[in-house]
Amino acid sequence: MKKNYIILFLLIFIIVSCKDKKPEIVIIPDYEKNHLQKNHLFGNIKEIHTTFYYQYDSTSTLKITSYITQYYSPDRVLLKIVTDDENGSLVSTQYAFYHDNSKEDYWIISDAYGKTTDSCKYQYDMNRFIAEEKRWHADSLLLTTTYKTDGVGNIMELKQNNNAFTLIKTITYSSNGLVSKIEEFEPSGKLFKYITIEYDQNGNEVNKRVFKSNNSLLEYTYNQYNEKGYLLKVIYENNMHRFRETYIYSDHDAHGNWLTEKRGNYIKERKIIYY
């Protein structure tokens, strides 16, 4: 009889423990994120159609200012971005090209007549981690960026050279592999400013602060999410210019992606197509 009580007690304990156990939260490190995850987009997206509006006041009709369409591959890499003006006429097209391992090789932007206006080329080291990036406007080299990475591919340092001077940024990561601090240095090597980033328990960016080297706050961005991790609001403040903006996100679809963004008199509406 005593043995039966012990077995019954163990069964009850196991049932209660399983009932109270919460799903494990998996935070994806930055080096593992694809384009969609880096941009807080959910689901296997095929296309995103965004319409930009401007409303002069609460009683006026919405005026379309432009359109942007983004195209993705089944393995969640960005293939093309098409920009049209308010009349639906083509303004520019950006094409992205990749290696077999889904690492981006280069991208180009062409105007409405098919002429290349801007381009970017990437180089990788023997571990297939990013090593260099070069950006051109037409035939002019604008910026060369070289990277130093750690053993898993996190960018630890980058140097940006615009043919006149070189700026250096160093990046620090949290134990979860998320960017926690970025330091920017002048060509002389003196710290210019630094950025701190805080996250919630799901790995969503919550607070981003930009400081001068003397620790005075320059900018502040606060992101608010609901219990499912859907983005609801972004508040941006610029102390230097005494400027504040609030972005409101609504009409989330079944995957958690917002379909409407409102910022003052500006409105974005998205239509998302999935595979």
Image (tube, rainbow, N blue to C red):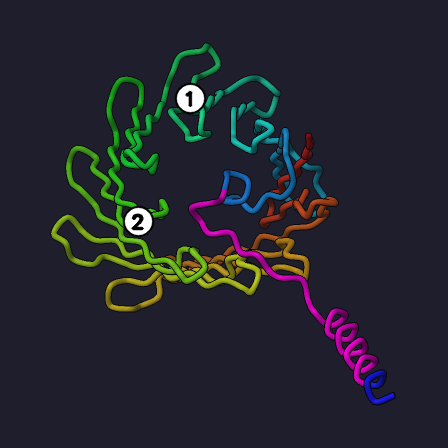
| 172 magenta-colored | no
Q: Which residue is mark 2?
A: 150
- Where in the figure is residue 16, as x and y percent of width and height? 77, 75
Q: Nearer the viewer, residue 224 or 243?
A: 224
Q: Image check: 265 left or right of 184?
A: right
- Which element type, helix, strand or loop, lies under badge 1? strand
Task: Tell me which residue sits at (62%, 32%) in the image.
Answer: 48
Q: For the magenta stretch, what is the residue range?
A: 6-33
Q: Is residue 32 left or right of residue 154?
A: right
Q: Residue at x 28, y 62 (%)?
A: 212
Query: Any magenta on residue 10?
Result: yes
Badge 2: how crowded within 10 Å, few (<14), some, or many (20+)? few
Distance (Cα) linking label 2 and label 1: 31 Å
Q: Position of residue 201 (x, y in %)?
A: 56, 65
Query: Nearest the camera: 87 or 190?
Result: 190
The answer to which image quadrant residue 70 occupies is top right
Which residue is at a point 31% across and 23% down the rendered structure image? 137
| Amino acid type, mark 2 | Asp
Disc 1: which residue: 109
Residue nearest the viewer, comparing 218 with 31: 31
Residue 141 appears at what percent x and percent y?
24, 25
Q: Earlier in the sequence, mark 2 or mark 1?
A: 1
Eyeballing the image, is 175 above or below 123? Answer: below
